[in-house]
Amino acid sequence: MIKPILSLGLMLFATGCSQFSQTNHAANNHVNPFVGTTVLTNRADLGYVPPWRTWNGLNAPSATVPFAMVQAGPLTTYGSGSGYEYEVNTIKAFVQTSNTQWGRQNIPILPLEGNDFTADDFASAFSHANESAHPGYYQVFLERYKINTEITATRRGAFYRFTYQGGQEKKLAFDLVHSGGGSSNWDLQSAGNHAVSGKQGGLYFYAVLNHRIKSIDTYKRNPNSPNLPRSGQGAGGQRRISGQIDVPVISFENESKPLEVKIALSYTSIEAAKHNLEVEIADKNFDQVRQTADKTWETILNKIQVTGGTEKEKELFYSCLFRQFWFPNVTSDAGVQPENLGSPALWDVFRTQLVLLDMLLPDVSNDIINSMLRGSARSGFLPTSFHGDFGSAYITGSYLRGVKGYDVQQAYSYMLNNANTADGNRARPFNNEYLALDYVPEVNIAHPMTETKSTAGTTKTLEFAYSDYSIAQLAKALGDMNVYNQMMKRSKNYTNVFDPETELMRGRLADGTWVTPFDTFYPYYEFMYREANAWQASFFVPQDPQGLIGLYKSPADFEQKLDALFTIPWKGYAVDNLSCFLGQFCMGNQPDFNYPYLYYFVNKPEKSQAILTKLLAHYFGMGPEGLALPGMDDEGSLTGWYVFNAMGLYPYSPADPQYIVSVPIFDKIAITLGNGKIFTIVKKGKGTNIDKITIGGKPLDGWFVNHADMLQGKELDIYLK
């Protein structure tokens, strides 16, 4: 989505863009890269009065291509997730990397003009009216310096075009002391008349400039300035960094053409960064790079084509789909084989984004898993990534979906190491207790608060039980029935933290007694639960929904508990990571992503559908700008939830190669799968609930469609009543 440019000062830019815009196609034009950059402030939306800036997306409108090392874009606020906060009207720098996590904004640069700035004050005001973004492209007009900035990108490089309009001396600042978390380890050196090189932390760069460098000057910061960076901003405490704090500024010989900067990155060396630049960007002009990025995004986004729906729904769908291909990022240099990708944020994305990659880009899934296994070869364990042990669920689900381009026996051995090693420092945290007790006990703490750090034992028990189930499925596929039986037995360990009195999952001490007192509504980060209260954690048993129901007095009793889950109002707790509630259900965080479907298992799918319809219609594209998400996107997890549910499919149990079916937003969805087959979903009728479902013209047995049927290119018809 390219927003209109209103400034008369940008007429030249707008004219120059018109020919390029004609080459854009449908899918790209539905993407709005600003979705997920705004903040919610309304209590009715959030569920509480926000005492801080809430985490409603934490995305950035950066220029990037799929799975790139580079995400080049604007930074308004250091230490703020992606670094871009829509409501802030000044740009401090343009960074070469971004993320929905903290501490990932690196190599900040900013074009300057003249001498009316200091090292403590050189940020520029801007207006959203003079800002635009499109897949692979970002543009903004810096009002302070009258500089129009355009950015495009390759996998390891960024290309800047700065059009100066003020007529004064052109300059370029490298604010290398700043990053998402602060960095005191940096360097910048001349590499000739038209190049500079350097590093920030462990990230190296090499930049080529089309203007001759006149000088590189050091601008001194005031050591007592409140603008000095601090480390650990955003997710943790704040500590002023030490070391070199000044700002190197490049001045250029006077030339009338726009200043162009090509900058490439490497995690290896400056020489490797230079190599990456030479391979990807050195011999190309700005429009060539931009057009390549545009075509790359168009190809990948066109893998799903939708018919019907409103323009707003298409914008949300493709904007969310766009986010599925940002992460994980390539970490190896150009030409290095095998190519290495960073480890995915497993706890966040195994539920949505990684499953979508299995469907659409199995080669990328193979690269991710192979990269994980190369790291595991050094440790002997799969990465556990933040919480839980979901590498096993990801690899099992991928394998059962036919993604098999890796050593599955090696992966299986690492899964078993994770599951069976009684050393919580090497594999699953607190796994020794889990193996001894069949649950992870909680510590007896007298007055726990939200921020209390403990075992999060109830959540770990539920998650480890699901991972055990995942391992069992791979064991079965590999013919290892002894492990299958063992792990299926362990997959029932969720029953050990079910409290029949409250009918919720509850913390237990090592002696078997329940944590007391027990407030079912109070949220914790790491006490009993991981980022949840009892309601938000208690129904995570995707491997055995019927077994979960069996813990209740009757299916009707379970249904009443679900009714309470979705209707008892949130109690107004203001907690990072938890926002936008439907009753106690939290749309803004991962733990209860699959809960809306629970009514299916008591034969009340219409109740599930009413909840899904409300969530899709009102909990995405929120806020006055219509750009907010209900919570932190976490590398595509939340936007992935929207993509799946908008299509009428959801990987209820990601380790299983099947998807639960609901009513899609669109009339028709055509999905080009990794094997080249087109799987089509067709909505028939005008009702709001499902009457019947057919796959390949035959009645679907139950509510789940199998991945194997999708791979054959069968049509899924959803008849409504």
Image: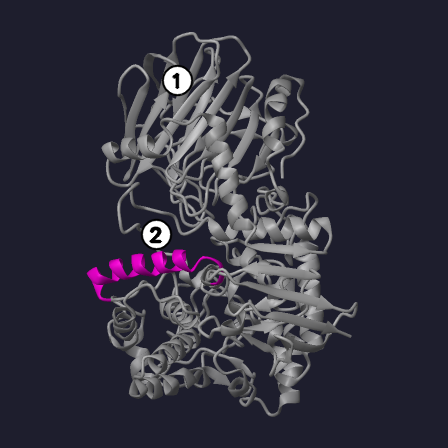
Helix, strand, or loop for circle 2? loop
Residue 391 position by quadrant: bottom left
Q: Is 50 left, or right, of 399 in this rendering? A: right
Q: Give, as a three-letter code, the residue at label 1.
A: Asn
| Residue 78 coordinates in the image, percent (x, y) | 45, 37
Residue 210: give its label.
Answer: 1
The N terminus is located in which quarter?
Answer: top right
Furthest-left residue in view? Answer: 378
From which residue to which does the magenta span run? 359-380
User: Which residue was labeled with disc 2?
Assistant: 342
Residue 278 position (above or below residue 102): above
Give the camera-side residue of 686 and 184: 686
> Dot 1, crowdedness within 10 Å: few (<14), some or many (≥20)?
some
Along the polypeptide, which appears first: circle 1 or circle 2? 1
The answer, for residue 522, to whether it is visible in the render is: yes
The type of residue carrying mark 2 is Gly
Residue at 64 percent of width and 85 percent of height: 602
Chief secondary structure of the magenta span? helix
Direction from residue 623 to residue 409 in the image, left or right: left
Q: Position of residue 648 (x, y in %)?
A: 63, 66
Is residue 91 found left or right of 211 in the rendered image? right
